[in-house]
Image (cartoon, rainbow, N blue to C red):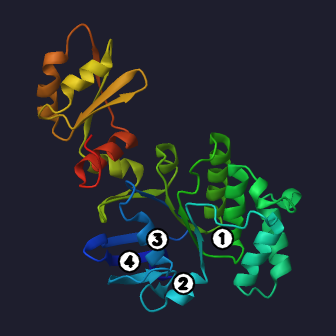
Amino acid sequence: MPDGLAIDVRGMTKRFGDRVAVDHVDLQVRTGEICGFLGPNGSGKTTFIRMLCGLLRADAGSGTCLGYDVITQSEAIKRQVGYMTQRFSFYEDLSIHENLDFVARMYSMANRREAVRDTLERLGLSERRNQLAGELSGGWKQRLALAACMIHDPKLLLLDEPTAGVDPKARREFWEEIHQLAGQGLTFLITTHYMDEAERCHRLAFIASGKLLTFGTVSDVVRQSHLTTWSVSGPDLHTLAEHLRGRPGIQQAVSFGSMLHVSGDNAAALEQAIAPFRNEQYDWRQVEPGLEDVFIHLMGTSRDGAPA
Protein backbone atom coordinates (compact mmCIF):
# COMPACT_ATOMS: atom_id res chain seq x y z
CA MET A 1 0.00 0.00 0.00
CA PRO A 2 1.45 3.40 -1.00
CA ASP A 3 2.85 5.54 1.83
CA GLY A 4 1.68 2.98 4.41
CA LEU A 5 -1.94 4.10 4.10
CA ALA A 6 -4.70 1.50 4.39
CA ILE A 7 -7.32 4.15 3.52
CA ASP A 8 -6.57 7.15 1.31
CA VAL A 9 -9.72 8.71 -0.12
CA ARG A 10 -10.69 12.21 -1.18
CA GLY A 11 -14.00 13.88 -2.00
CA MET A 12 -16.13 10.84 -1.11
CA THR A 13 -19.75 11.80 -1.72
CA LYS A 14 -23.07 9.94 -1.55
CA ARG A 15 -26.53 11.31 -2.30
CA PHE A 16 -29.95 9.80 -1.68
CA GLY A 17 -32.32 11.87 -3.78
CA ASP A 18 -31.92 15.50 -2.70
CA ARG A 19 -30.14 14.56 0.53
CA VAL A 20 -26.34 14.55 0.62
CA ALA A 21 -25.47 11.85 3.17
CA VAL A 22 -21.68 12.12 2.74
CA ASP A 23 -20.31 15.41 1.43
CA HIS A 24 -16.80 15.41 -0.08
CA VAL A 25 -15.06 13.62 2.81
CA ASP A 26 -11.28 13.13 2.77
CA LEU A 27 -9.76 10.48 5.05
CA GLN A 28 -6.34 8.90 5.43
CA VAL A 29 -5.78 6.01 7.85
CA ARG A 30 -2.38 4.41 8.31
CA THR A 31 -1.80 0.66 8.27
CA GLY A 32 -2.07 -0.71 11.83
CA GLU A 33 -3.92 2.38 13.04
CA ILE A 34 -7.14 2.50 15.06
CA CYS A 35 -9.20 5.40 13.72
CA GLY A 36 -12.29 6.43 15.67
CA PHE A 37 -15.18 7.70 13.54
CA LEU A 38 -17.47 9.96 15.58
CA GLY A 39 -20.64 11.88 14.87
CA PRO A 40 -24.34 12.19 15.73
CA ASN A 41 -26.86 9.62 14.54
CA GLY A 42 -27.64 10.23 10.89
CA SER A 43 -24.39 12.11 10.27
CA GLY A 44 -23.19 9.81 7.47
CA LYS A 45 -20.80 7.48 9.33
CA THR A 46 -22.41 4.19 8.27
CA THR A 47 -22.89 5.38 4.68
CA PHE A 48 -19.20 6.28 4.46
CA ILE A 49 -18.17 2.88 5.83
CA ARG A 50 -20.40 1.10 3.32
CA MET A 51 -18.82 3.04 0.47
CA LEU A 52 -15.35 2.07 1.67
CA CYS A 53 -16.09 -1.65 1.70
CA GLY A 54 -17.96 -1.67 -1.61
CA LEU A 55 -21.51 -2.11 -0.32
CA LEU A 56 -22.46 1.32 -1.70
CA ARG A 57 -21.09 3.02 -4.80
CA ALA A 58 -19.89 6.58 -4.26
CA ASP A 59 -21.45 9.29 -6.44
CA ALA A 60 -18.17 11.22 -6.41
CA GLY A 61 -14.69 10.92 -4.99
CA SER A 62 -11.55 8.91 -5.55
CA GLY A 63 -8.78 7.09 -3.74
CA THR A 64 -7.75 3.70 -2.50
CA CYS A 65 -8.62 1.22 0.22
CA LEU A 66 -5.95 -1.42 0.86
CA GLY A 67 -4.30 -0.32 -2.38
CA TYR A 68 -7.42 -0.91 -4.50
CA ASP A 69 -9.41 1.79 -6.26
CA VAL A 70 -12.56 2.48 -4.20
CA ILE A 71 -14.67 3.09 -7.30
CA THR A 72 -13.55 0.43 -9.78
CA GLN A 73 -12.15 -2.36 -7.57
CA SER A 74 -14.81 -2.72 -4.88
CA GLU A 75 -14.98 -6.52 -5.30
CA ALA A 76 -11.27 -6.85 -4.51
CA ILE A 77 -11.71 -4.60 -1.46
CA LYS A 78 -14.60 -6.70 -0.13
CA ARG A 79 -12.40 -9.80 0.01
CA GLN A 80 -9.88 -8.07 2.29
CA VAL A 81 -12.25 -6.15 4.57
CA GLY A 82 -14.18 -7.34 7.61
CA TYR A 83 -17.38 -5.40 8.35
CA MET A 84 -19.09 -5.63 11.75
CA THR A 85 -22.57 -4.10 11.63
CA GLN A 86 -24.39 -2.23 14.41
CA ARG A 87 -26.86 -5.05 14.99
CA PHE A 88 -26.11 -8.68 15.69
CA SER A 89 -26.74 -10.29 12.31
CA PHE A 90 -26.07 -14.00 12.77
CA TYR A 91 -28.38 -17.01 13.01
CA GLU A 92 -29.52 -17.35 16.61
CA ASP A 93 -30.67 -20.96 16.15
CA LEU A 94 -27.20 -22.02 14.98
CA SER A 95 -24.23 -22.62 17.26
CA ILE A 96 -21.12 -20.44 17.31
CA HIS A 97 -19.28 -23.09 15.28
CA GLU A 98 -22.11 -23.39 12.74
CA ASN A 99 -22.30 -19.61 12.27
CA LEU A 100 -18.57 -19.34 11.65
CA ASP A 101 -18.66 -22.31 9.28
CA PHE A 102 -21.47 -20.63 7.34
CA VAL A 103 -19.43 -17.41 7.00
CA ALA A 104 -16.40 -19.40 5.85
CA ARG A 105 -18.58 -21.05 3.19
CA MET A 106 -19.78 -17.62 2.03
CA TYR A 107 -16.14 -16.67 1.41
CA SER A 108 -15.56 -20.02 -0.38
CA MET A 109 -12.56 -20.68 1.84
CA ALA A 110 -10.58 -23.74 0.75
CA ASN A 111 -9.31 -24.40 4.28
CA ARG A 112 -12.71 -23.80 5.89
CA ARG A 113 -12.50 -26.24 8.83
CA GLU A 114 -9.02 -25.12 9.77
CA ALA A 115 -10.02 -21.44 9.56
CA VAL A 116 -13.05 -22.01 11.81
CA ARG A 117 -10.97 -23.90 14.37
CA ASP A 118 -8.22 -21.25 14.39
CA THR A 119 -10.76 -18.43 14.72
CA LEU A 120 -12.51 -20.14 17.63
CA GLU A 121 -9.19 -20.42 19.43
CA ARG A 122 -8.02 -16.92 18.54
CA LEU A 123 -11.14 -15.27 19.98
CA GLY A 124 -11.48 -17.59 22.99
CA LEU A 125 -14.67 -19.24 21.71
CA SER A 126 -13.56 -22.88 21.62
CA GLU A 127 -15.26 -23.89 24.88
CA ARG A 128 -18.56 -22.35 23.70
CA ARG A 129 -18.35 -23.64 20.12
CA ASN A 130 -21.61 -25.64 20.44
CA GLN A 131 -23.60 -22.95 22.25
CA LEU A 132 -26.48 -21.42 20.29
CA ALA A 133 -25.86 -17.82 19.25
CA GLY A 134 -29.28 -16.83 20.58
CA GLU A 135 -28.24 -17.91 24.09
CA LEU A 136 -25.15 -15.68 24.20
CA SER A 137 -24.84 -12.53 26.32
CA GLY A 138 -24.12 -9.21 24.61
CA GLY A 139 -20.38 -9.53 25.18
CA TRP A 140 -20.17 -13.02 23.70
CA LYS A 141 -22.36 -12.06 20.74
CA GLN A 142 -19.92 -9.22 20.12
CA ARG A 143 -17.01 -11.67 20.25
CA LEU A 144 -18.76 -13.96 17.76
CA ALA A 145 -19.40 -11.03 15.42
CA LEU A 146 -15.73 -10.02 15.61
CA ALA A 147 -14.66 -13.61 14.93
CA ALA A 148 -16.96 -13.81 11.89
CA CYS A 149 -15.61 -10.64 10.30
CA MET A 150 -12.02 -11.86 10.85
CA ILE A 151 -12.35 -15.46 9.66
CA HIS A 152 -11.20 -14.68 6.09
CA ASP A 153 -8.04 -12.96 7.41
CA PRO A 154 -8.88 -9.36 6.36
CA LYS A 155 -6.40 -6.47 6.47
CA LEU A 156 -8.98 -3.83 7.46
CA LEU A 157 -11.86 -4.06 9.94
CA LEU A 158 -14.77 -1.63 9.73
CA LEU A 159 -16.66 -1.79 13.03
CA ASP A 160 -19.96 0.10 13.30
CA GLU A 161 -20.75 0.85 16.97
CA PRO A 162 -19.47 -2.61 17.97
CA THR A 163 -19.91 -2.19 21.75
CA ALA A 164 -23.42 -0.70 21.86
CA GLY A 165 -25.35 -2.39 24.68
CA VAL A 166 -22.31 -4.26 26.01
CA ASP A 167 -21.32 -4.08 29.68
CA PRO A 168 -18.15 -2.16 30.74
CA LYS A 169 -16.07 -5.28 31.42
CA ALA A 170 -16.82 -6.74 27.99
CA ARG A 171 -16.09 -3.35 26.38
CA ARG A 172 -12.69 -3.18 28.06
CA GLU A 173 -11.83 -6.74 26.98
CA PHE A 174 -12.95 -5.93 23.43
CA TRP A 175 -10.64 -2.89 23.25
CA GLU A 176 -7.72 -4.87 24.61
CA GLU A 177 -8.29 -7.33 21.77
CA ILE A 178 -8.48 -4.47 19.23
CA HIS A 179 -5.15 -3.00 20.36
CA GLN A 180 -3.53 -6.42 20.27
CA LEU A 181 -4.72 -6.97 16.69
CA ALA A 182 -3.62 -3.47 15.64
CA GLY A 183 -0.19 -4.28 17.03
CA GLN A 184 -0.12 -7.20 14.56
CA GLY A 185 -0.74 -4.80 11.64
CA LEU A 186 -4.54 -4.91 11.34
CA THR A 187 -6.18 -1.55 10.59
CA PHE A 188 -9.45 -0.39 12.19
CA LEU A 189 -12.09 2.22 11.42
CA ILE A 190 -14.51 2.19 14.37
CA THR A 191 -17.63 4.24 14.98
CA THR A 192 -18.53 4.88 18.61
CA HIS A 193 -20.51 7.22 20.85
CA TYR A 194 -18.44 6.39 23.93
CA MET A 195 -15.85 9.06 24.73
CA ASP A 196 -13.69 6.67 26.77
CA GLU A 197 -13.46 4.45 23.67
CA ALA A 198 -12.72 7.40 21.40
CA GLU A 199 -9.77 8.30 23.63
CA ARG A 200 -8.32 4.82 23.05
CA CYS A 201 -8.08 5.42 19.29
CA HIS A 202 -4.86 6.58 17.65
CA ARG A 203 -6.69 9.28 15.69
CA LEU A 204 -10.26 10.57 15.47
CA ALA A 205 -12.48 11.82 12.66
CA PHE A 206 -15.68 13.73 13.46
CA ILE A 207 -18.44 13.89 10.86
CA ALA A 208 -21.70 15.85 11.02
CA SER A 209 -24.26 16.56 8.31
CA GLY A 210 -22.10 14.48 6.01
CA LYS A 211 -19.07 16.78 6.37
CA LEU A 212 -15.78 15.98 8.07
CA LEU A 213 -15.34 18.68 10.74
CA THR A 214 -12.08 17.64 12.39
CA PHE A 215 -9.41 14.93 12.22
CA GLY A 216 -6.36 14.12 14.32
CA THR A 217 -5.20 12.77 17.66
CA VAL A 218 -7.27 13.50 20.77
CA SER A 219 -5.02 16.46 21.61
CA ASP A 220 -5.23 17.69 17.99
CA VAL A 221 -9.04 17.54 18.02
CA VAL A 222 -9.28 19.38 21.35
CA ARG A 223 -6.83 22.06 20.19
CA GLN A 224 -8.59 22.55 16.84
CA SER A 225 -11.90 23.21 18.60
CA HIS A 226 -10.49 26.48 20.08
CA LEU A 227 -12.77 25.77 23.04
CA THR A 228 -12.37 27.39 26.46
CA THR A 229 -14.00 25.55 29.36
CA TRP A 230 -14.76 26.59 32.94
CA SER A 231 -15.78 24.12 35.64
CA VAL A 232 -18.14 25.40 38.33
CA SER A 233 -19.35 23.76 41.54
CA GLY A 234 -21.86 24.99 44.07
CA PRO A 235 -25.57 24.83 44.95
CA ASP A 236 -28.45 24.43 42.50
CA LEU A 237 -26.33 24.05 39.37
CA HIS A 238 -29.40 23.19 37.30
CA THR A 239 -30.79 26.68 37.85
CA LEU A 240 -27.39 28.23 37.17
CA ALA A 241 -27.17 26.33 33.89
CA GLU A 242 -30.57 27.67 32.85
CA HIS A 243 -29.37 31.23 33.51
CA LEU A 244 -26.13 30.68 31.59
CA ARG A 245 -27.47 28.97 28.47
CA GLY A 246 -28.17 31.35 25.64
CA ARG A 247 -25.99 34.16 26.99
CA PRO A 248 -23.65 35.63 24.34
CA GLY A 249 -20.29 33.87 24.51
CA ILE A 250 -21.65 30.68 26.08
CA GLN A 251 -22.11 27.78 23.70
CA GLN A 252 -22.77 25.04 26.23
CA ALA A 253 -23.43 24.54 29.92
CA VAL A 254 -23.41 20.82 30.60
CA SER A 255 -23.54 18.83 33.83
CA PHE A 256 -20.50 16.64 34.61
CA GLY A 257 -21.26 14.79 37.84
CA SER A 258 -21.34 17.33 40.68
CA MET A 259 -19.97 20.09 38.44
CA LEU A 260 -21.04 22.14 35.47
CA HIS A 261 -18.84 22.66 32.40
CA VAL A 262 -19.37 26.01 30.72
CA SER A 263 -17.71 26.44 27.33
CA GLY A 264 -17.32 28.77 24.38
CA ASP A 265 -14.90 29.32 21.50
CA ASN A 266 -14.27 32.99 22.35
CA ALA A 267 -12.40 33.15 25.66
CA ALA A 268 -12.98 36.87 26.25
CA ALA A 269 -16.71 36.70 25.47
CA LEU A 270 -17.04 33.63 27.70
CA GLU A 271 -15.36 35.39 30.66
CA GLN A 272 -17.65 38.37 30.22
CA ALA A 273 -20.72 36.11 30.14
CA ILE A 274 -19.87 34.28 33.37
CA ALA A 275 -18.62 37.38 35.26
CA PRO A 276 -22.00 38.16 36.92
CA PHE A 277 -22.10 34.64 38.39
CA ARG A 278 -18.56 34.53 39.79
CA ASN A 279 -19.32 35.10 43.47
CA GLU A 280 -18.65 33.37 46.79
CA GLN A 281 -21.58 31.01 46.17
CA TYR A 282 -19.77 29.22 43.32
CA ASP A 283 -16.27 27.89 42.78
CA TRP A 284 -15.11 28.63 39.22
CA ARG A 285 -11.99 27.06 37.72
CA GLN A 286 -10.73 27.14 34.15
CA VAL A 287 -10.00 23.58 32.96
CA GLU A 288 -8.74 21.87 29.85
CA PRO A 289 -11.73 20.96 27.67
CA GLY A 290 -12.29 17.23 27.42
CA LEU A 291 -13.23 15.22 24.37
CA GLU A 292 -16.87 15.17 25.48
CA ASP A 293 -16.89 19.00 25.70
CA VAL A 294 -15.57 19.11 22.13
CA PHE A 295 -18.03 16.46 20.92
CA ILE A 296 -21.02 18.38 22.33
CA HIS A 297 -19.62 21.62 20.90
CA LEU A 298 -19.31 20.12 17.41
CA MET A 299 -22.80 18.63 17.63
CA GLY A 300 -24.16 22.03 18.60
CA THR A 301 -22.52 23.77 15.67
CA SER A 302 -23.67 21.21 13.08
CA ARG A 303 -27.10 21.55 11.54
CA ASP A 304 -28.15 18.01 12.51
CA GLY A 305 -26.86 18.21 16.07
CA ALA A 306 -29.09 19.40 18.89
CA PRO A 307 -28.16 22.85 20.22
CA ALA A 308 -25.92 22.53 23.24
| The residue positioned farthest toward the bottom in the image shown | 72
Instruction: Give the Cα separation between the discs numbered 4 and 3.
Output: 12 Å
Q: Are marks 1 and 2 in contact (CB under 8 Å)?
A: no
In the image, 298: left or right of 5? Answer: left
Instruction: Give the Cα separation between the discs numbered 1 and 3.
Output: 14 Å
Image quarter of the C terminus = top left
In the image, 305: left or right of 123? Answer: left
- Pointer 2 or 4: first along the chain: 4
Picture layout, residue 210 above or below residue 252:
below
Graded by Cα atoms within 10 Å as few (under 14), some (14 to 19) or many (20 or more), the crowding at tag 2 reads: many
Residue at 17% from the left image edge and 23% from the top image edge: 274
Image quadrant where residue 183 sits: bottom right
- Please name whichever residue, 306 or 198, is drawn nearer the observer in this view of the structure: 306
- Pointer 3 or 2: first along the chain: 3
| Mark 1 vs mark 4: in front | 1
Q: Which residue type carries mark 2?
A: Ile
Q: Are marks 1 and 4 in contact (CB under 8 Å)?
A: no
Q: Which residue type carries mark 4?
A: Val
Residue at 64% from the left image edge and 45% from the top image edge: 172
Instruction: Give the Cα separation between the discs numbered 3 and 2.
Output: 12 Å
- Pointer 1 or 2: first along the chain: 2
Q: Which mark is residue 77?
A: 2
| Mark 4 vs mark 3: in front | 3
Dot 3 falls on a residue whose secondary structure is helix
Residue position marked by numbered label 4 in the rendering: 9
Q: Which residue type carries mark 1?
A: Cys
| Mark 3 vs mark 2: in front | 3
Dot 1 falls on a residue whose secondary structure is helix
